[in-house]
């Protein structure tokens, strides 16, 4: 379908996120440097997992990716605190 074609044509990127044991934790859809979807297991939004949400926000910022989805919660200040907590 068109989704597979977009990935094959490198118009979209699918990024799989795994924990330190290799278990899949999230799936991100990126197009034109924009994060369009960020899903957990069972298609839940990444924002349902605050620590992972903070990691996705930090990664997007470092990679120059603009977050264009409600799947990720971006709140100034709180996101930084969550990132620090996730690193502990």
Image: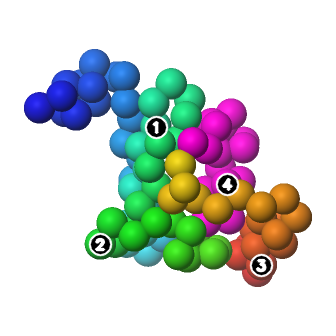
Whether pointer 2 and pointer 4 mark residues with C-beta atoms closer than 8 Å, the reply is no
In whole angstroms, how far apart are the C-alphas of marks 1 and 4?
13 Å
**Mark 1 highlights which residue?**
30
What span is in magenta?
53-68
Q: Which residue is mark 2?
A: 42
Where disc 2 sits, the SS reads helix
Q: Residue at x 53, y 49 (%)?
A: 69
Instruction: Name the residue beneath numbered marker 3.
Output: 85
Q: Earlier in the sequence, mark 3 or mark 4?
A: 4
What whole-number distance in Å separates the C-alpha atoms at marks 2 and 1?
Answer: 19 Å
| Sequence-first tag of 2 and 4 | 2
Estimate the spatial distance between the alpha carbons at disc 1 and disc 3, rounded to whole Å: 26 Å
Mark 1 Cα-neighbour bin, 10 Å: few <14, some 14–19, many ≥20:
many
- The percent coordinates of residue 57 (x first, y second) are 67, 54
Residue extending farthest right: 77
- The answer to if 71 sits in the magenta stretch is no
Quadrant into which the C terminus falls: bottom right
x 34%, y 22%: residue: 10
Q: Residues within 10 Å of mark 4 (few under 14, many from 20)?
A: many
Q: Which residue position is annotated with label 4?
A: 57
Asked if the residue at tag 4 contacts the one at tag 3, i.e. Cβ–Cβ closer than 8 Å, the answer is: no
Residue 54 in the figure: left or right of residue 44: right
- Can you see residue 51? yes
């Amino acid at each position: 379908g068109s989704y597979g074609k977009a990935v094959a044509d490198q118009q979209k990127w699918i990024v799989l996120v795994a924990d330190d044991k290799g278990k899949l934790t999230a799936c991100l859809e990126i197009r034109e440097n924009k994060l369009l979807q960020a899903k957990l297991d069972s298609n839940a939004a990444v924002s349902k997992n605050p620590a992972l949400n903070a990691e996705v926000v930090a990664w997007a910022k470092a990679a120059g990716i603009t977050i264009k989805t409600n799947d990720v919660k971006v709140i100034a200040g709180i996101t930084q605190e969550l990132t620090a907590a996730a690193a502990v």
